[in-house]
Image: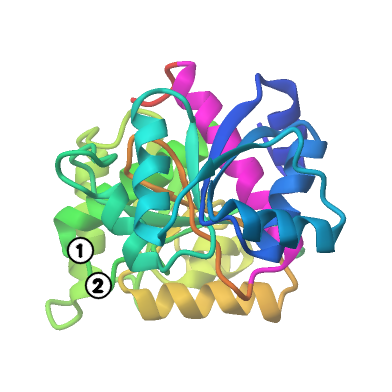
Amino acid sequence: MIQHVNELITQAQTQNSMRLAVVAAEEAEVLKAVNEAVEKGLIEAILFGEIGAMKQIAEAQGINLSSFKLVKADTMEEAARLAVQYVREGKADFIMKGLVDTSIFLKAVLNKENGLRTGQLLSHVMVYEVPTYHKLLLLTDGGMNLYPDLEKKGQILRNSADVSRALGNEEIKVACLAAKEKVNPKMPATVDADGLKQMGAAGKFGDDVTVEGPMALDLAISTRAAKIKGYKSPVAGEADILLVPNIEMGNGIGKAMTYFAKSQSAGIVMGATVPVVLTSRADSHEDKLHSIALGSVIAGWIKEGGRK
């Protein structure tokens, strides 16, 4: 089981190199991260975009593109369409957003006729190594879905469980967060959390998944807090996944872990046929590399038949 973010790199190095399709690769930080991933043996890279601009940026950064496959695209839309086509044809194993606008990128991924749809909701999953926590902690969804209803939260949970499985976790403990532990009809987060718990008890997410909720954050990550408050659950203080009720809570917790707790992290979008690397402009070079490694590990896990 992977217990540290850096182990994503080690794991990616031990499997067959996955092929990464990068949409609009003419951006310095993206090229640097992809180049390092290639040099470390994590991936093979296929770059889509304006080749002259890529070569100019690579030369300025001291990057040798001779081991990269370059595919010419005159527009952002064409770059996204061609990269998705490569994935559909089995020429690439996962896909990454480069300089292209997120809306253009996701439009190609979600195209009903030629995209990478599975019928599952796309959702964002962050993996954090928090210095004060004893294992990797997954957070979902603080990046894509604004106010998901119970059905969508179920799909978000399934996506995050797949990430946890790809990391080698055989017993997945999910905390459905809310402000309190008692179900209150006036607090929809508590109602949905209880619904997810019942779905988990019915085996909707797999026999390897234990769902608890509603739970406050302190109970999910602190056995001491749970003991003091007399809260008993196998998830208390042992959560692998924090499922948030809305994007504000997810965004706030995620940024707090990054900036206050100095956590290392990696992020991925799940729900498509392949992992989707969708990094933020504010992400460090190191976090971009970790996200590529995470995508590679999940892509390898999917190819080996790991997805349920």
Q: Which mark is residue 305?
A: none
Left or right: where does residue 160 sit relative to residue 268? left
Left or right: where does residue 192 sit relative to residue 293? left
Secondary element at image label 1:
helix
| Location of residue 262 in the rendering, given as x and y in whole percent from the top left corner | 75, 72
Indicate the quadrant where residue 167 lies. top right
Judge by depth and name the residue closer to the eye, 241 or 42: 42
Residue range of the region highlighted in magenta in the rendering: 283-304
Q: Amino acid at mark 1?
A: Asp
Residue at horizontal 53 percent and vertical 65 percent from the top: 99
Residue at horizontal 77 percent and vertical 33 percent from the top: 10
Mark 2 burial class by Cα count in 10 Å: few <14, some 14-19, many 20+: many
Q: Quadrant of the N terminus?
A: top right
Asked if residue 188 shows in the view, the reply is yes
| Location of residue 4 in the rendering, given as x and y in whole percent from the top left corner | 74, 46
| Location of residue 145 in the rendering, given as x and y in whole percent from the top left corner | 29, 66
Mark 2 lies on residue: 189
Q: Disc 1 and disc 2: Cα gap in Å?
A: 5 Å
| Location of residue 224 in the rendering, given as x and y in whole percent from the top left corner | 63, 66
**Most frequent secondary structure within the magenta stretch:** helix
Judge by depth and name the residue closer to the eye, 213 or 284: 284
Q: Which mark is residue 192?
A: 1
